[in-house]
Image (spheres, helix red, strand yellow):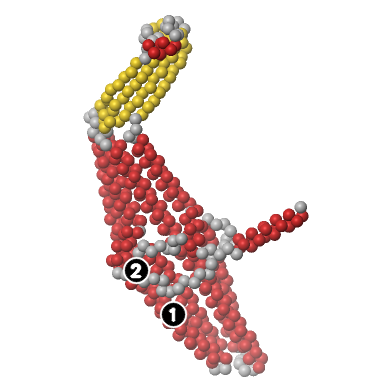
Amino acid sequence: MITKKILFLLLLVGFQLSAQEKKWTLEECVDYAIKNNVSIKQSELDLKTSDIEKMEAVGGFLPSLNANANYSVNTGASINPVTNQFQNETFKSFSASANSSINLFNGLSNWKTLQRAKLSKIANSYRLDKMKDDIALSVANSYLQILFNKEQLKVQKNQNLITKDNLKRTEQLIEAGSVPAGDIYELQATDATQEQQIISTENALLISKIALCQTLLIQDYANFDISDEEIDLPLSDVSNQSQEAILAKAKESVKDVKIAIANVDLAKKSVQISRSSYLPILTGFIGYNTRWSESTPLNFADQLSLFDGTGIGLQLNIPILNGLRTRAGVQRAKVSQERSEYQLKQSELDLERNVYQAYNDVINAKKSFEAATKTLEARNQAYNFSKERYDVGLLNAFDFSQSTNAFENAQSEVLRTKYDYIFRTKILEFYFGIPLIKQQ
């Protein structure tokens, strides 16, 4: 028994260590978010509702069939269902009927309703796809923010190690009398500032992890981590495409305009359905009924056979005046159609603006990254030169600290512009129809 307990504890510890060592890739994060996000699950329910609406529309073509039965004990003056005469005595009676009807013509409302149900499913499919795209972009943004904070933290820690080494060296130089004692204060201030920046970046890293965890609906913030992926630049040549070509691709792949087009189609179909109320309705029906009474001198089976009857016929309902409800319904549907058409136009304008904005953002982000890289190269050379002069006593601690800060800021700016360039490129690729993650 003890051996089993020890084995169980070892397995449990091993499982916990495995869970803590889990490193989430971008593909895993996006896939997990899409499978577990609440908004996506709600959108999937909308898609199921579309299937129900389609089933209901198909049912409109089918005949109705209803049956009923009635058994009663009659006292006093009651109508005998067999003789259809009043009887002032207690007797038992039974009646049953079955009726069926079918809509032969109602202005093709059933057919148009079925078409609308199919269009509704298409629209909800587009909405679900858009929801997945939005979640994927949100996850990618949060993921890249974590990567940026991680690299920023590495740079700051490495720079702080260099500063601490310089502190030790300066202390030795002060003890040897090579530099004045005041040179240590500037380096101590730089060390304290860097430690403060490290704490701030660690906090930013934690917050960015929590933000991604919340998107993924993961509550174990402490053990959550992502893999340290290397993203090579340049990402793709999508920015070499013309803005017109990217816009044309966006109209094919981005769901916003497709949703707006589907809404216009739905509105048009609603107008057609509402107009069907102007037309007459022709219904075919057939019915069967039978009855039994205890007071009639025949057995139960004979009465059911003898006193049964059938009815078959047509019913025509012609709308003449219904308080202008049909007219109001048509006008209301037309207003909804016009509103949908305006929304489509606005969606097309928004897409065009977003594509052009995304294109310019990539161009500017690339230029900013290239400029930051050149600045870092220059700052690195300046820092190395300052360090050489400081090591031989030709540069004071204040000027050396200024050179160090400029070098740190240049490193931070390269990281910031790098990940901004990456995310902007991902957005432009999305508009061009390039998947955010590789398809498995």
Residue 382 shows in the view:
yes
Residue 412 placement (x, y as % from top left)? 49, 76
Q: Quadrant of residue 302?
A: top left
Which residue position is annotated with label 1?
373
Q: Relative to 66, say whether 184 is above or below.
A: below
Q: Position of residue 343 (x, y in %)?
A: 30, 53
Amino acid at the residue labelled 2: Tyr
Residue 359 circle label = 2
Q: Residue at x 37, y 37 (%)?
A: 56
Residue at horizontal 64%, vertical 94%?
177
Q: Nearer the viewer, residue 212 or 305?
A: 305
- For residue 26, above or below residue 47: below
- Which amino acid type is shown beneath numbered disc 1? Thr
- The front one of 191 and 359 is 359
Could you say whether the residue bearing mark 2 is in a helix, strand or loop?
helix
Spatial CA span between label 1 and label 2: 21 Å
